[in-house]
Image (cartoon, rainbow, N blue to C red):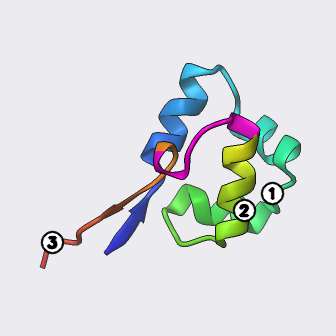
Amino acid sequence: MKISYKKLWVLLIQRDISKVTLRKEVGIAAGTMSKLNKGEEVALPILLRICDYLDCDIGDICEAVREEK
């Protein structure tokens, strides 16, 4: 399984929030933001802080996707 943050990027576009603004407002480290951009795993507390900032559920910003074999 792999994680996808495509829903997060769509939500940011819909709300007219830049990635830079999200990073500053939520207090996300540059390395963690890089992981989000690459679709790598990040710590659950960070995802929960993003959800709190965007007032949404975790399923609204990410999803698990099966990797094709």
> Mark 1, mark 2: which one is toward the viewer?
2
Relative image position of residue 37 (x, y in whole percent)? 57, 55
Q: Furthest residue to the bottom?
A: 69
Relative image position of residue 56 (x, y in whole percent)? 60, 38
Question: In which quarter of the view is residue 11 placed?
Answer: top right
Where is mark 3, residue-wise? Answer: 68
Distance in Å between CA atoms under marks 3 and 1: 31 Å
The disc, 2 or 3, on the residue closer to the chain's N-terminal end is: 2
The disc, 3 or 1, on the residue closer to the chain's N-terminal end is: 1
Question: In which quarter of the view is residue 43 placed?
Answer: bottom right
Please report the residue visible at 65 percent of the width from the left and 58 percent of the height from the top.
Answer: 47
Above or below, comparing residue 31 to residue 8 in the picture: below
Which quadrant of the figure contains the C terminus? Answer: bottom left
Amino acid at the residue labelled 1? Ile
Q: Are marks 1 and 2 in contact (CB under 8 Å)?
A: yes
Relative image position of residue 36 (x, y in whole percent)? 59, 59
For the record, the magenta segment spans 53-59
Which quadrant of the figure contains the N terminus? Answer: bottom left
